Image (spheres, helix red, strand yellow):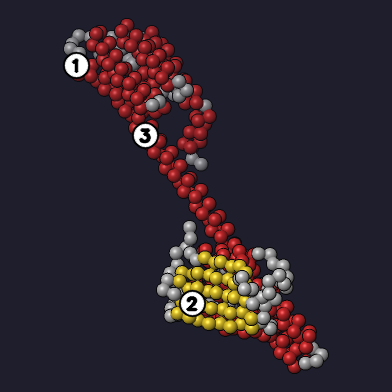
Amino acid sequence: MDVGMVGRQWLDRHDRIRDALPAVPLVLVAAAATAAGKSSWHEPRWDEVAWTALSCLPLTVRSRRPLAVTLVTLAAGLTLMALEPDFALAPAASLVALYTLATRGSRRTAWTVGLAAGVAVTGVYSATHEGILAGGVSLLRFDFAIAATALGRAVRSRRDHLAEAAARVERAERMQEEEARRRVAEERVRIARDLHDVVAHHITLVNAQAGVAHHLMRAHPDQAYEALAHIKDNSRAALDELRATVGLLRRPDDAPSTRAPIPRLADLDSLVGGFRTSGLSVWVARTGTPSPLPPATELTAYRIVQEALTNTHKHASATRTAVVLHYGAHSLRVTVTDDGRPGSPKGAGTGHGLMGMHERAVAIGGAVTAGPRPEGGFQVVAELPLSLTPAV
């Protein structure tokens, strides 16, 4: 921290001293002006110096009461001009006050008082000196009053501009922080959805295949061994997907690690195969004209199918499920329908799966509807855009 900044901070804490500082050079100049002669120096006229010092006393509160100080100093200066016409320094204190009023008061007040002060000073000077009203020296006094006001308004405008710029910077930083927090919250929700989908899907399959292995262990050990192999495969797939999802939390400068590729619709056969080995019959059909999809749409469609099949296996007591992918002109319709018997769920759900499907679809501009069918079973229908238009 430099000496100038320390000095400014000290003056800000002692505003009376700061306001009185201009009086020091004014008194010194008054003493020098009254001591200067035509050919030599003489003793200053102390009465005029004392009057100048007295007229500067109100400056000690010029920041707190700028209008009152301006009027008082102007009255004192005009009086000194009337009593001592040859005192060239009058009314210097009122010029300081006019500058302060311009920096702290309104524009209308500053210019009104400034013009009135200029006219008054010019009139008093012209009345106490020979010559016409519009003489050069008279107009110079008028110009001093206008210049003090203009300088004060320029400083005020600059301060307002800097304050406005600082406010904009602060507002931009605050908005940036809020945007960062919002993005973090959205990313946290997205990762939570991914973790829910991965864990729910694979744990459901592992649980089902473990039940099959337990049932077949004694009577059909070969089939039980095959079920255990499926458990191993699903466990490894779960670990790979968890590693890929958690890897999203790594920073860019972290050491690279092996990540599983993002699931796509081309991986549906592998997904469906896992459910088939657990005892759920799944039929997949594709209609329309398949076209390239954005990665986000493919991932969303895959996760919706995964969650719908997981819910069917866990809660619907279903034996058959149909997955239909219809490629339309502007959207991909994903329909998952099961034949579960109403009123006989395998277990109670938390509702997070359906909520996750809805959030995923809305995030890319799509929609999901889900509910029981009148003829029995449960159906999930997702409309996903072929070109992304994220919801606001």
Visible residue check, residue 218 = yes
| Residue at figure coordinates x 73%, y 86% from the top left | 228
From the viewer's perspective, tell me whether residue 25 is left or right of residue 192.
left
Q: Which numbered mark, 2 or 3, is in the foreground of this view?
A: 2
The x and y percentages for residue 160 are: 40, 36
Residue drawn at (49%, 69%) of the image = 384
**Element at badge 2?**
strand
Instruction: Please give the label number shown on residue 134.
Output: 1
Nearer the camera: disc 1 or disc 2: 2
Q: Residue at x 61, y 71 (%)?
A: 373
The reply to whether dot 1 and dot 2 touch (C-beta < 8 Å) is no
Tell me the number on the disc at residue 157: 3
Looking at the image, can residue 308 be seen?
no
Task: Estimate the x, y position of residue 23 in percent, counting from the top left.
Answer: 41, 20
Type of residue at label 2? His
Decide which of tag 2 and tag 3 comes sooner along the chain: 3
Tell me the kind of residue under disc 1: Ala
